[in-house]
Structures are given as structure tokens and as C-alpha cells.
Amino acid sequence: MLLDVKITGFDALSFDVDDSAIDAFKARNKGLTTDITDYLAGADNMLDAESIAGHLFPVQHADVFLSHTHQDHDAVVKLAVTLERLGMKVFVDSCIWGDVYDLLLKVDKARSPIPGKPNTYYYERTVRTAANMYMILNVALQRMIHNTELLMFLESKAVRVEDYVEGKAYIGSPWIFSELMFARMVKRRARPAPAKGLENFKEAVARTADAAPAPLVRYRLPESAHTMAASDLRTLMANASPQATLARMMGTTPDKNVFLDAFYTGLPVTAAERRLLRWPPLPAQPAR
């Protein structure tokens, strides 16, 4: 990962994306995985962690990882479609496995039912299953973040929980908390070196639920490296759209770095981040 940015006021955005484009994005991503029960192995229906880790996300490359609450799912998919039109590859985890609680219920039905008692399960086994599944999925998410250039945390009213401590920000999602904490700790990686003779950077290497129940725990909101208002994001996407549309009309793929470079230019990137972006250093300021 190179940069992480919090997009404030995401729920105020609207996107010109029709239902067919939304359905196509969901269908394309949903087809990446098999039924979770396919990962059960042996007579005891043990979870096959190695298979899950190796095959849950077969597409290992994404330019943008969207960290979001499931309540904003439809708006997030619209943003993903819009970014794809600008040349980006976008990862939305809820399009891969859907509602994590529904996913766990599938596993419990396969390996933890109490005989003769419909919709009743062995407590110890369900707890162990949940702990193992959360660990496996969390590692898979961290791998995706590590292999992504930009993490966007989409902050909205649905992300926050009621807070009575002045000046403190909290969230109710352990998944968002884990993603943002990992983003704070992961090593920042530079862009691949540009290919010779090209003005813009080209990819040189392949880089490696419905609403969840009310949270029982609240998590202090980790700080993002940068913050951008949703209205500024919308303006940047609108400015990049004509070039992307022209590229598609010419039968070529829009250059993702046209948008990404414009996006990063709107941030107060540090000298170290400029080096990771392979941008030239800023000229030294004359001494006063």
C-alpha cells in the first residue's frame, strides 16, 4: 500500500450509475469465489484454512481498496463502478463474500447442527468457527490492502456509533477498525518504476451484512494518513471522466494514473510520499 485517505461525508455523494452497471459489477465479483462450504474438509467438516487463504481472493491486484460499512454497500458499489470507468481496479469485500454473518451461518449449518433440533447449534463449535473464520478473513483482507496502492476509508453517518465523549470518534465495525489499524502499520510501497519512453506510469508488475447487528463493542477510530472531503473526490472524478471516456471510445483502457495523480495532488503529500509516488522533489524554498 502507498497511501490511505479518509473520505469525509461519503453519504452526501450521489453517482450517475445505472442498475445494470451495478448488477454487472456485483456479478463479476461474486463469481470469484465458490460456496464457503466448499472449504470444509474431512469427516469432521474441518475448516480448510489454507484453501480459504489461497482461493478466497483469486484476483490479487487492485488499485483501490474501499473500506466501508455494509449499510453503505450500494453507494460503495456505485463509487467502485465510477472509479473503474476511470481505469482503476477496485476491491469491495462485501461483493466477494456478502454478509459475513450469513457466511458464518452457512458454515454452522454444515458443521455444528444439533441433531433433531432445527436451527439449533452447538455453542462451543460455533464460537470456535467464528473465531477461525474472522482470523482467516482478516488475514485475507490485510493481504489485499498490502497489495493495493490506495485505501479509501469512506466515512459516513452509518459508520459511527453514538458517542457522548466530546472530541472522540468511534466506530462499531471491527472490520473497519482492523483495516485502518493495518493501514497505519503496513510498510508503504513505492509505485513500480515507469517503463522507458512512456510519459505516464504504466503497470510494470502484478501486485501481489444487509445491515449487521448493532455493535456490542465500539472502537476508537484510527487516524488516516490523509483526509479529503467527498465533494472534492466527486470533482476530481468528474474532471477525469472526459479523458477516460475518450480513451474507451478509442478502444484503449483509461490510464488509471491520470486520476490517481490528480487525486494525490489534492493531498498534502509528504516528501517521503512523493518519493514513493516517484514524483520529483519540490524545489527548495529560498531562505528569508
Image (cartoon, helix red, strand yellow):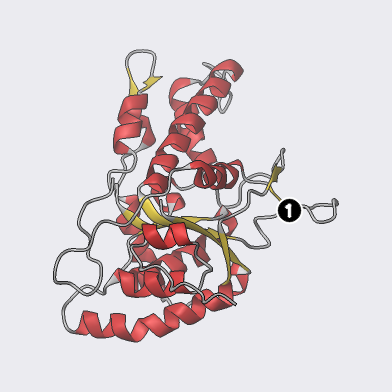
Q: Which of the 4 quarters of the picture holds residue 245?
A: bottom left
The answer to which of 61 and 156 lies nearer the viewer is: 61
Question: Is residue 65 visible to the viewer in this orientation of the structure?
Answer: no
Left or right: 119 in relation to 186: right
Question: Is residue 126 visible to the viewer in this orientation of the structure?
Answer: yes
Q: Which of the 4 quarters of the picture holds residue 225?
A: bottom right
Q: Amino acid at mark 1?
A: Ala
Left or right: 157 in relation to 208: right
Q: Which residue is at a point 31% across and 57% down the rendered structure image?
A: 191
Q: Is residue 49 above or below residue 140?
A: above
Q: Position of residue 265 (x, y in %)?
A: 45, 73
Query: Is disc 1 surrounded by few (<14), some (14 to 19) or many (20+) residues within 10 Å?
Result: some
Q: Is residue 26 above or below residue 233?
A: above
Q: Which residue is at a point 17% across and 63% down the rendered structure image?
A: 195
Q: Position of residue 25 (x, y in %)?
A: 35, 62
Which residue is farthest left?
197
Which residue is identified by label 1?
169
Q: Position of residue 81 (x, y in %)?
A: 38, 69
Location of the C terminus by quadrant is: bottom right
Q: Which residue is at a point 48% across and 25% down the rendered structure image?
A: 132
Q: Is residue 225 above or below residue 133?
A: below
Q: Which residue is at a point 35% across and 38% down the rendered structure image?
A: 35
Which residue is farthest front?
288
Q: Is residue 173 above or below residue 258?
A: above
Which residue is farthest top?
43
